[in-house]
Amino acid sequence: MHVGDGLVACFAPTYAAAREKFLDAADAARLDVHSDVHPLRGRDGETLALDIVRDGPTEASRVLLISSGCHGIEGFCGSGIQVAMLRDAHWRESTRRAGVAVVYLHALNPYGFSWWRRVTHENVDLNRNFLDFHAPLPQNPAYDEIAHLLVPSTWPPSLRNHVALLRILLTRGARHLQAAVSVGQHTHPQGLFFGGHAPTWSQVAVRHALREHGRRAERLAWIDLHTGLGQSGVGERIFAGPDDAAMLARTRAWWGPHITSIHDGSSSSAPITGMMWLAAPQECPQAEYTGIALEYGTQPLLKTLHALRAEQWLENHPEHAATHGARIKQQLRDAFFTDTDDWKRQVVEQAMEAAAQGVAGLTAVRN
């Protein structure tokens, strides 16, 4: 698939600029935009919204979702990819010929995107929030044990803090620490990977978008764009669905045998609770669902974790924003977006390939 010379210009330095590029690309493509407006304003006073563009007929039985910004600040990557796709006439023509409607969900978590946070305005990790809140919530005693170490009362952390976390890392291993931190937790609202106590605004908006654009589909595919795990610039294709062997087999048939899964331990991601992608079969039960998270690497895992810890400490201690804010926020952005031309080209090229494979899968004849 062709990747144009203006690729780097698809990316933006702020949420407001990214949204403008996305809306302009939709306008140039003569596509309508539906905006689900967030109740709060952005960092620069701008409107926040989940913007949705459908490129294809409303009656299409094959639908491909391409979403960005589930984790706020990760939208800097995903938005640029979506703009590149909307500007690519060859890609758009190929989807029309295939009879596939492509639905772009821009900035699932616009608040986090604008304010350079990974979480929503409720301090919730959106991809840990898709739960039945009338039922008992998952427990994470491993997180409870180290919560005070992950987000200490002072920053930078003390030597004692470093030693305590290093001891856990050396005695229990990196995989244990990653799982303890990132599986999701519901007991520390000012901590990391908090799954919430109720559906977030973004969860409600995502479910509404799924119903609106997936309810007439016979086949529904989803590519959710993420950053922060794995080798720099490499897009790991992670199975985005329930622990379902048939669904996983279909996903590997579409996107290749190297598809990883949190269910069998092959993914760089630890198992997580409250996954957003489970909403697709819930909201569109009539459709055959197949999905992946495309996870692009940026920095080493422990460096990214350090950036997340610092940013959460800053959120808990806004009185230090004047002295620490700019540095910590830039550190977080660097952990989830690599601002080089080569990295941007890499991520778009891989996304274009995955999107073409998604279209091929949607239109393949069933065995």
Image (cartoon, grey):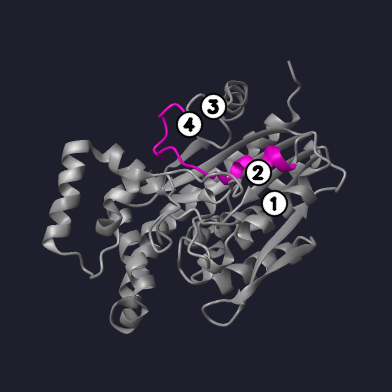
Secondary structure state at the residue bearing disc 1? helix
Secondary structure state at the residue bearing disc 3? loop
Q: Residues within 10 Å of mark 1 (few under 14, many from 20)?
A: some
Res 5 seen here: no
Q: Amino acid at mark 3?
A: Gly
Residue 162 vs residue 20: left or right?
A: left
Q: Amino acid at mark 4?
A: Ser
Q: Position of residue 284 (x, y in %)?
A: 75, 40
Q: Disc 3 designates what residue?
A: 256
Which quarter of the figure is the C terminus placed in?
top right
Q: Amino acid at mark 1?
A: Arg
Q: 348 or 280: which is nearer to us?
A: 280
Q: Disc 4 designates what residue?
A: 261
Q: Position of residue 118 (x, y in %)?
A: 46, 60
Q: Nearer the viewer, mark 3 or mark 2?
A: 2
Q: CA distance from mark 1 to mark 3?
A: 28 Å
Mark 2–mark 4 CB contact (< 8 Å) = no
Mark 1–mark 3 CB contact (< 8 Å) = no
Residue 313 vs residue 234: left or right?
A: left
Whichever of labels 1 and 4 marks the residue nearer the N terminus, that label is 1
Q: Which residues are magenta?
A: 263-283
Whichever of labels 1 and 3 marks the residue nearer the N terminus, that label is 1
Q: CA distance from mark 1 to mark 2?
A: 7 Å
Which quarter of the figure is the N terminus placed in?
top right
Mark 3–mark 2 CB contact (< 8 Å) = no
Q: Disc 1 designates what residue?
A: 207
